[in-house]
Amino acid sequence: MRYSNMVTQIGKVLNKHSDNPVDLSYLTVMSGHIELWNAMYKGKAPWIKGETESCNLPASISQEIARLVTLELKSECTGSERAEYIEPYYKKVLESLRRYVEYGCAKGSLVFKPYITSNGIAVQYIQADCFFPVSFDDSGNVTDCIFTEQFRKNKKIYTRLERNTIENDELTITNLVFVSTNPEILGTEVPISYVDKWNMLESELKFKNVDKLPIGFFKVPLANIIDSTSPIGVSVYSKAVDSIKIADERYSQIDWEYVSKEAAIHIAESLLKRNENTDKFEYPGGKDRLYRTLDYSSGAVDKPFIDTYSPDIRDQSLYNGFNNQLKRVEFDCNLAYGTLSDPNNVDKTAEEIKTSKQRSYSMVSDTQNALQNALEDLIKAMDFWTSIYGLAPEGEINTSFEWDDSIVVDSEKARQTDRADVAMGAMSLVEYRMKWYGETEEVATQKLAGQQDDDTSGDDE
């Protein structure tokens, strides 16, 4: 079901089951854009028709930002037996994190929703087009939302709406199930026990002393130019929709240039032999694609019986236009020049390179902070369900994060600079080891002392 259609029907269901009116008007405004971002990501934007092809920029942009955000990410949970229990499940999340962050970047947001199975903790990754936030608090935390799950069986479509609400430090989880034969409507509400797949779930659960929904909510840290009052995230290419459309058109022009200027030989039909079995002309060597038949009448002004068509291809000028448009897309998406465009044709000075990379670094850094907040909330949600089901003793959980900053910082050059500082006495060897070997001051001092002892022993011999 289309996201915008689902928003309308969920609004009706919530108002039917709630004493207080539910207003999803802000989602109605955003729903069309979420559908557009999703279509663009799949290469099915509304302008991709006829001769216009997609050069898959949205997928490339989302993939690259997700790669830069998660590059060499190191994170772990320590501090107690509870942390040790959660750690392997958290590691599984990190293993597939880049792929799901890419989906979040494309569609504007992503929800990490842990739940308990017979094998321990599992995490459901809910993309923006299956997530319907109803309300937020003043800090931007989701306080009421709907998750959807749907499957088809025997020509019937089953849909489950799971509502999670926080009110007066009480968490309420409600499940509503619908069955329909039309994919565009929810259909008839049925008891949850009616569907075998969900009959182990409760219609309603309540938990006291809970101040936050047990989810991790990641949203792209960009201003919402569509609805400045909306608290939900926007796609990383939300400001580049028009630029991407033009890029697709210019890309298609290049493709058409090669197709339309493909070499051909115009040949008179009288020079060809017709195959009586197929009722078609037989071309020399089977080169059907090369030859184009024409009817020539005899006369003093006739063209030659064979005429070669091989015009010049304007690829250079078209590529220059396409490359310049890619630079526009890079700017609109906070990417450094050369990420999508030709890296040999950008940033002529060191200052321009630094400014371009700094723009990309700022975007990646802000996204890393947003993702870290979501992962920390995910750990808290895992901790919550671990306590509810008594899976491990209570204990402190310390979560550490180490992010890569190589977008702006050239590690090798920085290391050479620090070595020069050590040589001139501006940096101590202890500081150098602490920075580049990740050692504490105590460990670095001990290792340096051990090296000096080894050198002294060698001198004695």
Image (cartoon, rainbow, N blue to C red):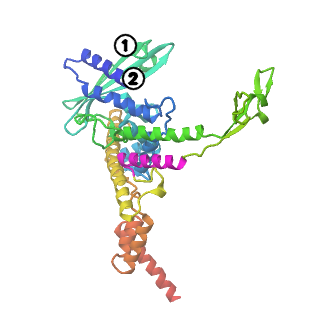
Residue 342 in the image: state x and y as whole percent.
48, 53
Q: Which type of secondary structure does the marked residue at label 1 adopt?
A: loop
Q: CA distance from mark 1 to mark 2?
A: 24 Å
* Number of numbered discs visible in the structure rendering: 2
Q: Residue at x 33, y 77 (%)?
A: 426
**Closer to the eye: label 1 or 2:** 2
Q: Residue at x 40, y 68 (%)?
A: 414
| Residue 284, picture quadrant | top right
Q: Nearer the viewer, residue 309 or 144?
A: 309
Q: Which type of secondary structure does the marked residue at label 2 adopt?
A: loop
The magenta stretch spans residue 214: no
* Mark 2 Cα-neighbour bin, 10 Å: few <14, some 14–19, many ≥20: some
Look at label 2 and name its amino acid.
Answer: Arg
Q: Residue furthest front?
A: 300
- Tag 1 residue: 191
Residue 230 in the image: state x and y as whole percent.
25, 34
In the image, residue 276 above or below residue 311: above
- Tag 2 residue: 2
